Amino acid sequence: MILETKRLCLREMKQADFGSLCQILQDEETMYAYEGAFSDAEVQEWLDRQIARYQKWGFGLWAVILKETEEMIGQCGLTMQPWKDQEVLEIGYLFQRRCWHQGYATEAARACKRYAFEILDADEVCSIIRDTNTASRNVAVRNGMTATDRFTKHYRGVDMPHDRYVAVR
């Protein structure tokens, strides 16, 4: 286990989490900010990328486990992401749609912010959020972040404006 909150445990994902990850990444509504659900191959690439991040940096998106049921309900963690001409430390989060609006994303994101400042000794951390993703924007605000700048990413053939929300230690 990497982190623990009142209701959640965060741990590294492993191959056995593939099915739970599919419940998130293959849901059209959950993945609207990514322009649609992922194929099995794309889910596997996502999982492989997290495992490689753990090995390279010691962090990545972690499995979010609901203590009450011991079920993986989402993923939240820290990644290095390109932003304009630099790499930035980002808190990312994606949860099963049935777990939305219950405070899980905010609870996990706050724990990741503490981890970034207290364990990684980061000076700042951000969340990069598509401009149409109101729920994720709200999580960033509840996590003490402020929108600072905008950049347009090109992904899956679509230009997607993204805002960077930043918290400074």
Image (cartoon, rainbow, N blue to C red):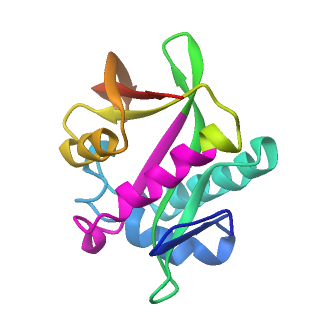
Left or right of residue 56, residue 114 in this image: left
| Residue 109 sits inside the magenta stretch | yes
Image coordinates of residue 3 in percent, x first then y, are 62, 63
Nearer the observer, 29 or 4:
4
Residue 116 lies left or right of residue 22; in this view the side is right
- The residue most toward the right is 55
Q: Which residues are magenta?
A: 90-115
- Which quadrant is home to the C terminus? top right
Residue occupying the point 65% across, 49% down: 49
* Camera-nearest residue between 75 and 39: 75
Residue under the point 54% across and 50% down:
112
Specify whether residue 10 is in view.
yes
The residue nearer to you, when weighing 2 against 44, is: 2
In the image as oriented, which residue stretches furthest toward the bottom? 69
| Residue at 54% from the left image edge and 59% from the top image edge | 41
Judge by depth and name the residue closer to the eye, 63 or 155: 63
Q: Position of residue 151 (x, y in %)?
A: 35, 17
User: From where the camera sits, is residue 35 visible?
Assistant: no
